[in-house]
Amino acid sequence: MSTSVGTPAPASRLPRSVDDVTGRSARAILAHRDSPARQFARLVLLGVSIVVLVGGWRVTDIDLAKLANAQNAGRILTALVQPDVVARDITQTEMRTPYTVGVTGTGEAVATTPTGQRLRVLPAAAKAGDSVELVGSGFEPNADAQLRLDTGTGRTILLSRIPTDNRGGFDVEIEWPSANTAPAGDYTLQMLVNAPSGGLHISDTLVTGLARMGETILLALMGTVFGVLFSVPFSFLGARNLMGASPVGLIIYSATRTFFTITRSIEVLIVGLIMVVIVGIGSFAGVLAIVVHSIGSLGKLYSEAIESIEPGPVEAITATGANRVQTVLFSVIPQVIPEFLAVTIFWWDHNVRMSTVLGLVGGGGIGYLLIQYIQLLQYNQSATVLWMIVAVVTAMDYASAAIRARLV
Amino acid sequence: MLVIEHLVKDYPGNVRGLDDVSLTVPDGEFLVLIGLSGSGKSTLLRCINRLIEPTSGRIMLDNVDITAASAADLRKIRRSIGMIFQQFNLVRRSSVLTNVLTGRLGYVSPWQSVLNHFGEDDYRRALINIDRVGLRERVHQRADRLSGGQQQRVGIARALMQEPRIMLADEPVASLDPATSHSVLKYLQQINREGMTVICSLHFLSLARTYGTRVIALKGGKLMFDGLPSEIDEQRFKDIYGEEAVEVEIR
């Protein structure tokens, strides 16, 4: 078998496989088998991995059936697509009529308003277990009406919530509650109807949320600014290429890096909890938490930026007879400025994300609002806040990436 | 006059960088260092201004012992030793002017330099030296916008700002094309003819023959040859670069 020199050989004239020469296939020649010890070790690793995963499943109480029971999930998901961003003003109409409890009455009790709303209650007195018919007309369509019993002592008892139909009326029967709820006596029946009125406007939730979001971004900014002010000087002490020349320098370098690692290892929420204890609930605690957490992370990132500079210019400036400070000023700082800026912007972006959760521990910002809404089961309002966080974090993410791309 | 006596440099791990090198460089010489990569050329140059600390031996510049100088004295001595580098070692993001002015840092008080304050005298020198290397048009450009040859000329201007007694050049043209190499070496030759001692390591023997007034060769940290460029014949060349080597000419 021969191939001509100088011209590419057609495929058919190449050796079909190495066994043309050796009698063995190329695959067999190139085959690679691990040693038995390695194969065994791999088997052990696989076994250990399975045990850890199974154990983890049990320890963390993973229960997929709970996910299937999605009553709350449904409400939350519904709320997510219906955030509270616009609202109409609510006008409340009140009407009253005397009512006796404890006897089964006859006839009807009627309440009216000058604006044409009318409520009839049949019969005009009731005792526990009686069926009472409520007929209303002239209200706003799809409004929310509450029937209450006024004890005359400043306390009212909610009897029923009645939605009005699309013509603004209702006709429902309720069962009169037990004597425990409404003891016998003379009362005043009170009807409160909440109806939306006027045009759509931005909801209070959105206004509050925007204010809190502004506070959150500024909280992150202040935390970042002070974090930068503290970490930049330290970062030069934590750069091995500047400090590694002498034993004393190496000690300072190691101490600085250890300091960075310690402040970085405590998560921002935990620092926040501690700061709330020290300075009380509010944004200041959040700022302090971000500062402490940022010093370690920024310091480390800055130090690494300094360590990655070209050594040549440092050598050249040293050779001119410049002292250490001059060398850093004229050869290190010009080289690290773009990287420092990029790191700072990235970290502000990161800190905005951090400050959205700081409110959970009382550190101010929008997280504080969110946890209030969630605890009050106000899912639509919670959804508004969640979407605002998504929008702001996404925008910051994009903006910081764009700025960094231009800098580096 | 530069006198080097029994200079030894040991690197960690039992690596001998320089092995008992003794050398006298009279004023006004254009001394070319040749030798393979790793033969100790860069180490020798950097020991002269103590960018690398020698292990033992003495270096005297005009009867001042560089090797024994304190940190403060060393900075003063370094002012009189200019240096240019293979990779130019400019601060890329700084302007040509700033790079040239940094050559003056050994003379400026630290407090003034913190404020980025150079005197009228420093600016005047910068102007003269930038003109000298023909870069007046580029004075405010960032160093990394310049071609390799232009960057090396900035390096020369920076070193000239020190008003040095001698100029060290560590492979100054190894990153440049042949034509640019000549233009850069012509600047060094010009400086040399005005009276400054130049010590320059080069890869190409042909360049050493063209520009050097004297050649020394290092091999494995030892001084192999010390003489005139014309004295390097075929056999000496093979002694320095090994039996396999073939001389490549650069014109």
Image (cartoon, coloured by chain):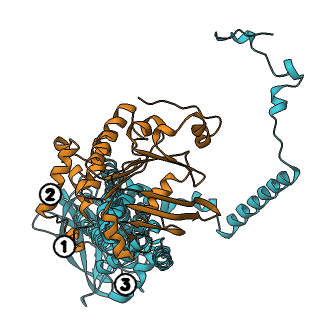
Q: Specify the subunit that label 1 lies on.
A: A
- For disc 2, the marked residue is B123
Q: Specify the subunit that label 2 lies on.
A: B
Mark 2 vs mark 3, CA separation in Å: 55 Å
Looking at the picture, which amino acid does disc 1 mark?
A: Met
On screen, residue A214 versus residue A15, left or right, reads left
On screen, residue A12 versus residue A243, left or right, reads right
Residue A293 location (% of width, % of height): 41, 74
For residue B52, above or below residue B212: below
Rendered colour, chain A? cyan
Front position among marks 1 and 3: 3
Residue A125 lies in quadrant: bottom left
**Regarding mark 2 in the picture, which secondary structure is present there?**
helix
- For disc 1, the marked residue is A95
Q: From the rendered image, report the letter of the chain displayed in orange.
A: B
Look at 53% across and 64% down and name the residue there.
B7
Q: Residues within 10 Å of mark 1 (few under 14, many from 20)?
A: some
Residue A256 location (% of width, % of height): 45, 77
For residue B210, above or below residue A312: above
For residue A275, above or below residue A297: below
Q: Specify the subunit that label 3 lies on.
A: A
Q: Residues within 10 Å of mark 2 (few under 14, many from 20)?
A: some
Look at 33% across and 57% down and name the residue there.
B166
Front position among marks 1 and 2: 2
On screen, residue A168 versus residue A353, left or right, reads left
